[in-house]
Amino acid sequence: MSFHKHHRARFADPMEFITRAINKLNTLWLCRTYPFASVGTRLFVHYTAEIERRIAHRIKLGNLVSLNRHVWLNVSAVEDDGEPVIILEDGCAIGHRTTISAKNCIHLERNVITAQSVLIMDHSHAYEDVKLPIRAQGTSSGGRIRIGQGSWIGHGAAIVCTKGELILGNNCVVAANALVTRSFPPYSVVSGNPARVVKQFDPIRNTWVLGSIKPMESEASKPELALHAS
């Protein structure tokens, strides 16, 4: 393909420029007028993403964060003050139609990326009285979610914590359509409903092994490589 043909192909759709301009203006508007707990540089927010102004003070966004088409950041219990309950560190990229709904805390560490249609939720609907409609029972007390740096969440996966703390270690992979309801150690590939480890990287042997590594076989059980490692 000649240079001129290639150049025309890149800009064949005039609406592309308009969409980029709208996204840029939308991002600038949010950065300058929304009361985020903090917001970094080079943020990208697609104009279809949903973030209500009234919850912005409970959201913390790092540098180079991107929120793509129809992403929804939701805070279920809005208070006038308090610590951020949605934290997206530097380099996080949230895929199309992903929902992050927090009541207590959902924390994505550096360079976590999600595919499309992912759900990350640290609470659920309460269902203690079978005589009442579920919509009238509010939400559960919920838990907390932390996803380690460098992790990848596949298409249609759901990470849900209804109590306690759910932690994915660094560089985990969650397969498409997996349902994650408990913690997993670093370097795990998890799949299924409910999710389980299908393979894990063994730092002792410097290779991948099927299933979970036995604690006695790997340094992953040591405190410095525990789930809370960052």
Image (spheres, rainbow, N blue to C red):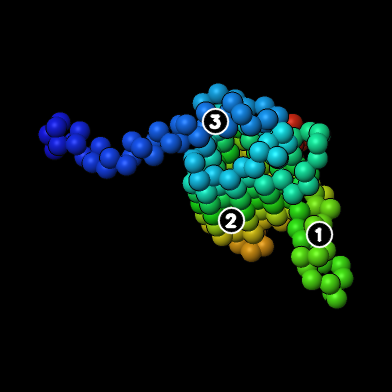
Q: Are marks 2 and 1 in contact (CB under 8 Å)?
A: no
Q: 10 Å neighbourhood of mark 2: few (<14), some, or many (≥20)?
A: many
Instruction: Give x and y (percent) for residue 181.
Output: 71, 56
- Where is mark 3, residue-wise? 29
- Given residues 108 and 15, the one toward you in this image is 15
Q: Amino acid at mark 2?
A: Ala
Instruction: Give x and y (percent) for residue 180.
Output: 67, 55
- Disc 3 to disc 2, how far (Cα)? 31 Å
The residue sitting at 61% across, 50% down in the picture is: 99
The residue sitting at 70% across, 40% down in the picture is: 55
Quarter of the figure with the N terminus: top left
- Where is mark 2, residue-wise? 157
- Disc 2 to disc 1, how far (Cα)? 24 Å
Spot the residue most to the top: 41
Please state which of the two labelled residues, at mark 3 or mark 2, is closer to the viewer.
3
| Marks 3 and 2, the one that precedes in the sequence | 3
| Marks 2 and 1, the one that precedes in the sequence | 1
Q: Secondary structure at mark 3?
A: helix
- Where is mark 1, residue-wise? 138
Q: Secondary structure at mark 2?
A: loop
The residue sitting at 81% across, 40% down in the picture is: 79
Spot the residue most to the bottom: 131
